[in-house]
Amino acid sequence: MRRGLLIALSLVLVIALGFAIGRFSTFGASPSSAPASDSAEAGFARDMQVHHAQAVEMAMEIYRKTDDPDLRVLAYDIATGQAGQRGEMYDWLVQWGLPQSGAPMMAWMTESDAGHEHGGSSAPPLTDDQAREAMGMATDAEISALAAATGSDADCMFLSLMIRHHEGAIPMAEAVIELGSEPRVREVAQSMKATQTAEIDAMESMQSRLGCSG
């Protein structure tokens, strides 16, 4: 118990540092023209912060209790990498003078091909629950189940949830690459797409190695 708490505390500190580094990674930058509040860049920054927050939560949970060294390394990379990206996206909105929350989730994607899959611009906005489902996010019940699970059950549950989570992030990254014009936002989105695609491959390999069903 004490070891688990120390591991969790250490990771919390690392996550906080990662967010802070990301938060000030663009300190002093001066974009030529700030995106508007209803822009793809602003919507992406807001929605992806929510998305990343859950990924960090799940990664910290499995990092604390898994006995699989490869999974622990992956969880650490996901938690620290996405914490840093959250910090940078938070800072984008600060620099642009925009609030951290705004339009309904995923509303900014309606002009992209990804948005057309959800009904296009003529469809009513998704509810938060519908948007979270479309983004591949875990439900509250699934988060609770992951917290309660142990051993290989926890490992396999995490992999299943995180693969779905990553699969929901990739269309968001593709949409802001298509719709956005800010070079740094598009660069981060492209890196995110590549990283999470590679991580999906790694997690599917782990599922096979661990004998996860489904």
Image: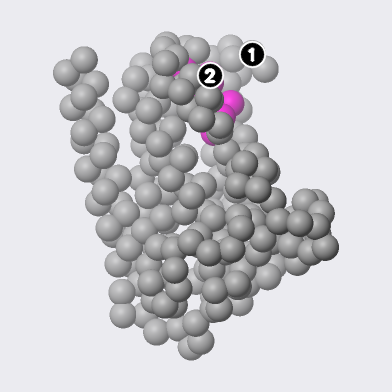
The secondary structure that most of the magenta stretch takes on is helix
10 shown above or below 34: above
- SS assignment at label 2: helix
Residue at x 59%, y 63% (from the top left corner): 103
The kind of residue tagged 2 is Cys
Left/right placement of residue 141 relative to residue 77 reads right
112 shown above or below 213: below
The residue labelled by disc 2 is 156
Q: How many marks?
A: 2
Left/right placement of residue 214 relative to residue 142 reads right
Residue at x 68%, y 70% (from the top left corner): 179
Screen quadrant of the C terminus: top right
The kind of residue tagged 1 is Ser
Residue 13, given in percent of the width and then of the height, sits at 22, 43
Mark 2 is surrounded, within 10 Å at the Cα level, by few (under 14), some (14 to 19) or many (20 or more) other residues, namely many
Q: Which residues are magenta?
A: 154-162
Which is nearer the eye, 193 or 37? 37
The residue labelled by disc 1 is 213
Give the spatial CA distance, label 1 vs label 2: 8 Å
Q: Earlier in the sequence, mark 1 or mark 2?
A: 2
- SS assignment at label 1: loop
Is 190 contained in the magenta span? no
Q: Which mark is residue 80?
A: none
Mark 1 is surrounded, within 10 Å at the Cα level, by few (under 14), some (14 to 19) or many (20 or more) other residues, namely few
Is 157 contained in the magenta span? yes
Residue 205 lies in quadrant: top right
Disc 1, disc 2: CB below 8 Å?
yes
Screen quadrant of the N terminus: top left
187 shown above or below 151: below
